[in-house]
Amino acid sequence: MRFARPARRPAGDSTTTGQHRRPKPPKPPRDRRGPGRRRLLITSITATCAVLVAVLALRDASGPADPADDAKCRPTELLEPPCGAWFGAFVPHDKSDLAEKVHEYEKNVGRGLDIVYTYHDMSAVTETRLEGQLLTEQEQRVGEDRMLLLSWESKWWGGTKQQQPTWKQIAAGDLDDSVIEVQAQRIKEYGQRTGKKVFLSFDLEMDTRTPDNGTPADYVRAYRHIHDRFRELGVDNVVWTWIITGYLDHADLFKSMYPGDEYVDWIGYNQYNYYLCHKTDWLSFAQTQHATHDWIRANLSDDKPLMLSEFGSASDPKRPDRQADWYAQVPRVLKELEGVKAALQWNYRDPGPNCNLAVANDRAWASLRKVVADPHLNQPLE
């Protein structure tokens, strides 16, 4: 279930400083590898040089260190990979074939996904309707070897107007018995059974949902209420992920809808090269990411791990190789984006003409396969 995003526009200047930034702790002294200064007796120079040559030869022969061999690269308690970034995707699927579609995508991209992204509404769960059920049987199968990002939306897809939850109702506890506590218990049991945590996002791109769902203050109260109920119920295997559009004309909304550092573990944003979809110029991967990244760091948090929760590019019908070239830029730019610890490719379409954002052709798939083979995107899951 998707909705049209506003067209991307150039970022405006912002001099407002955020109210939620934590001071960074002092950085430890940089670990400088290599031989230190030593006082050498003249008589030992020849022997020492021989030893150094042998060591360097062995190091070159062994190649670069594998992150899986380095204890410092193991994920943190908040599922942050210290030495690089996760690679994930949204893969279009039905509730009954998620595992099949994920395997098909992984075959095309030449590797397993670190994170699989799925969506749910807040409807009542029945035997025939699973949209409101977090951690379906299919998701749990996929989650055996991968992490899950569950996007939980204050909607009842296909429901009547009266069935649509509002932020005020959520904050007041009206959905606690029928929805919030039922799903909290499912997540808790999943963690107890498997030892796994899940990324959980409440109302991604909430900046597009006001005023229909309520005011920014209503959203913050609803988000905090869900978070607090989970905590009161002993659900300790959720990584709270707050996801915005990243559309900087909504900058004031981002500030007013941020729940606060104590309620957010990761910050995500969704930025694309829409091109003909929104009748914009062709934007490089760097152009889609840098402005929003820098704004978040300056105005919301200078230390939270960041997630490119959806990224992708439209294709150019006049230049079939253009999408492949766009993806080829990803590893270099990711390494420039301080604190970005996950990148999830959106392999589907958005509403509207010329809005298919999926990988378009064989050359684009080949480019993406090369991208996701980069060591930066291959981090140990445990």
Image (cartoon, grey):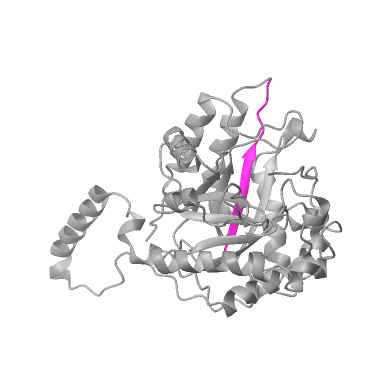
- For the point 79% across and 50% down, the residue is 160
Q: Is residue 302 above or below residue 287?
A: below
Is residue 316 found inside the magenta-colored segment of the image? Answer: yes
Q: Going by the picture, which residue comes out furthest to the top?
A: 318
Q: Is residue 109 left or right of residue 267?
A: left
Q: Nearer the viewer, residue 309 or 234?
A: 234
Picture quarter with the N terminus: top right
Residue 9 visible at all? yes
Residue 172: image location, x then y, percent: 76, 74
Q: Is residue 228 left or right of residue 10?
A: left
What residue span does the magenta drawing correspond to?
302-317
Q: Going by the picture, which residue comes out furthest to the front?
A: 127
Residue 265 visible at all? no
Residue 2: image location, x then y, percent: 70, 44
Looking at the rendered structure, the number of numbered marks drawn on it comes to: 0
Q: Is residue 373 above or below residue 189?
A: above
Is residue 98 found inside the magenta-colored segment of the image? Answer: no
Q: Nearer the viewer, residue 341 or 15?
A: 341
Q: Is residue 312 left or right of residue 84?
A: right
Residue 155: image location, x then y, percent: 73, 54
Q: Is residue 237 above or below residue 270?
A: below
Picture quarter with the C terminus: bottom left
Residue 23: image location, x then y, percent: 63, 78
Q: Nearer the viewer, residue 272 or 214?
A: 214
Q: Nearer the viewer, residue 36 or 115?
A: 115
Residue 51 occupies quadrant: bottom left
Residue 320 occupies quadrant: top right
